[in-house]
Image: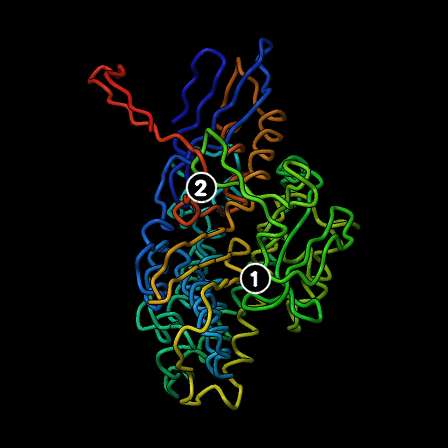
Amino acid sequence: MEETSGRTVVIDPVTRIEGHSKITLKMNDSGRVEDAHFHVTQFRGFEKFCEGRPFYEMPSLMARICGICPVSHLIASAKACDALLAVRIPPTADKLRRIFCLAQVVQSHALSFFYLSSPDLLLGMDADPTETHLFGVLEKNPELARQGIRLRQFGQQIIERLGGKRIHPAWVVPGGVSEPLSVENRDAILAGVPEAQQIAERTLEWFKSVREKFREEIATFGNFPSLFMGIVKPDGGLTFYDGKLRLVGADGKIEADGLDPANYAEYIGEKVESWSYLKSTYYKPKGWLDGMYRVGPLARLNVADRIGTPRADQELAEFHELQRTAVLSSFHYHHARLIEILYCVERLAELLEDSEILSKHVRAFARPNAFEGVGACEAPRGTLFHHYKIDEQGLIRWANLVIATGHNALAMNRSILQVAKHFVIGDKLSRGMLNRVEAVIRAYDPCLSCSTHADGHLTLQVELIGPAGEVLDEIRS
């Protein structure tokens, strides 16, 4: 729904994203956009829910943060608990966690690309909003819709085979995983790999065939200089599970490398804006605003020297031909997402064929040996941190979650302003104009249920609205 009040345009809610939000566009006297805000309107506050709970419950509890990417929270939380135990998990458990993580990325990226964004790409940015959904895609291109459903199913079935259920699994535990992989489940997953890889490759070719239709969007969808951040392997390769943080500038040159995720608070600052429940982060050495960076698929491909599997590395080389520096336009998140799907399918097949993957030794047991632990991984939407402090009884006394969507908060706000200034004219609004403002947010694929853990002095406002829409009472905390 769009509302125009005076010189303000409100898009409420933002559609085809995970969670609740709205966009406010401020117009000047000439009917042009002069400011824009992306408001995250829900608040959950999982950090406070955790206080007083035994640390070993945290992975299972944290999986409940989100129904789209529960595995990412499960893994980051378990890694934080590994740090509290001060243990090295068994090699097979490490590989199984990686497979779990890769399956999560496949299903989440498939949801983002096929279900949420493909209506814009297939039907066009100016299409009737009553048709821009998966059923509209099914009617226009049945094969594309079916492939999207099948690819997401492939990832979800792996999660179910390993974790026992597709949503909120509790299989990853402090010290490893709770159960080893069976021969039957390994073989069943491997049997689905060829089809999944074919779908990923066909979709990449389809996307590249339609990309040229969106030159104007590519030029304006978050196309500006920024830093990019992601976790890389020691050799600079792409990873979702473990490694060190690297930041790359808009020129493609490394800004910082080898940063220990456990020390994230030394170089990542967090700030709360008065108009959103979403925390915004920034790179401390650059300061607020100048320290804006992006995370997620686009950032990961910008910071990595290589991907590490044959077909995905071919696609990465072609991806970097888009721009001599770092690839800057956030429209290219879609392209990067598809390349990552291809990598995940290739890589999980390699891991499943490892000679140790069926080992029964999948968990290390210990008591807490530290009072503080940080776990980090690459969630589908970007870098994720879980940071816990416990007391002598092993109870959580403090927790902080730094979510991928929060890392992108500054960039998303700047992106909607750029898009709105280019497309939106206040005295003759159209669906296509406003849909493009929403579409740039969809490119980032924010997960707002994950990310609404505001910290600081954010005011909570509750309004009592009467039947005619009037404000009867208001409380601010």
The residue type indicated by label 1 comes to Ala
Residue under the point 42% across and 54% down: 399
Figure colour scheme = rainbow
Q: Where is residue 287 drawn, in percent x and y?
A: 67, 39
Q: Who is closer to the viewer here, 444 or 173?
A: 173
How far across and down, in percent of the image, does residue 326 sit? 73, 50
**Within-10-Å neighbours for mark 2: few <14, some 14–19, many 20+:** some
Q: Is residue 113 above or below residue 102?
A: above
Spatial CA distance of label 1 from label 2 is 20 Å
Residue closer to the observer: 278 or 104: 278
For the point 49% across and 62% down, the residue is 105
Residue 378 vertical position relative to residue 7 in the rendered view, above or below: below
Image quadrant in which the N terminus is located: top left
| Residue wearing tag 2 | 455
SS for tag 2? loop
x, y (%) of residue 207? Answer: 59, 52
The residue most toward the front is 392
Residue 286 or 85: which is nearer the viewer? Answer: 85
| Identity of the residue furthest to the top in this view | 29
Vertical placement of 177 versus 112: above or below? below
Q: Which residue is mark 1?
A: 262
Residue drawn at (50%, 59%), measured in percent from left and top? Answer: 379
Report the residue that reaches farthest toward the left.
467
